[in-house]
């Protein structure tokens, strides 16, 4: 009897699941976005299965701030539910500053 296929293919047996959303925020919107990101971090980390929300930033030459925002989850189902129904970084950017982020990338975190 063949083993059933995994619902979500995996690279390794011990992984967590992450999302990455990248956006460029104009300098004039940065203070408001930064404050909203602090509130978002506290909110998202209360979701079941969320291990962390991290943001890495880079100041660009023209004054914009490029943000890489990662979330990490225990299971792919928890990540999927968050992306479908949760208050994501992408949704927050639209609400707070009218900024459209790049499409979110779903990845496996191996270490």
Image: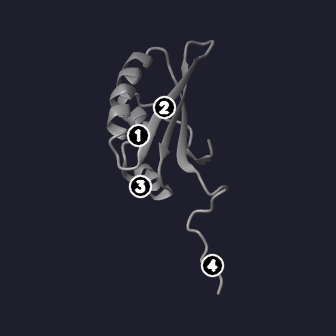
**Mark number displayed over residue 65:** none
How many numbered marks, from 0 up? Answer: 4
Q: Nearer the viewer, mark 1 or mark 3?
A: 3
Give how far apart the Cα atoms at labels 3 and 2 are: 19 Å
Judged left or right of residue 87, residue 25 is right
Q: Disc number at residue 81?
A: 3
Label 4 crowding class (10 Å Cα cut-off): few <14, some 14-19, many 20+?
A: few
Give the residue number, with chain letter if any, for mark 2: 54
Dot 4 lies on which element?
loop
Quick check: 67 above or below 4?
above
Quarter of the image that includes the N terminus: bottom right
Residue under label 4, please give it: 3
Quick one: label 2 or label 4, which is nearer the N terminus? 4
| Residue sitting farthest toward the bottom | 1
Q: Which is nearer the eye, 21 or 77?
A: 77
Q: CA distance from mark 4 to mark 3?
A: 26 Å
Q: Nearer the viewer, mark 1 or mark 2?
A: 2
Q: Say if mark 2 contacts mark 4, CB within 8 Å.
A: no
């Amino acid at each position: 009897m063949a083993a059933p296929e995994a619902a979500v293919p995996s690279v390794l047996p011990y992984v967590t699941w992450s999302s990455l959303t990248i956006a460029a925020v104009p300098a004039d919107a940065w203070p408001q976005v930064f404050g909203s990101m602090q509130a978002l971090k506290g909110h998202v980390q209360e979701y079941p299965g969320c291990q962390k929300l991290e943001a890495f930033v880079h100041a660009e030459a023209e004054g914009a701030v490029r943000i890489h925002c990662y979330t990490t989850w225990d299971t792919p189902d928890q990540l999927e539910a968050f992306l479908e129904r949760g208050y994501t970084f992408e949704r927050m950017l639209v609400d707070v500053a009218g900024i459209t982020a790049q499409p979110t990338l779903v990845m496996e975190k191996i270490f």
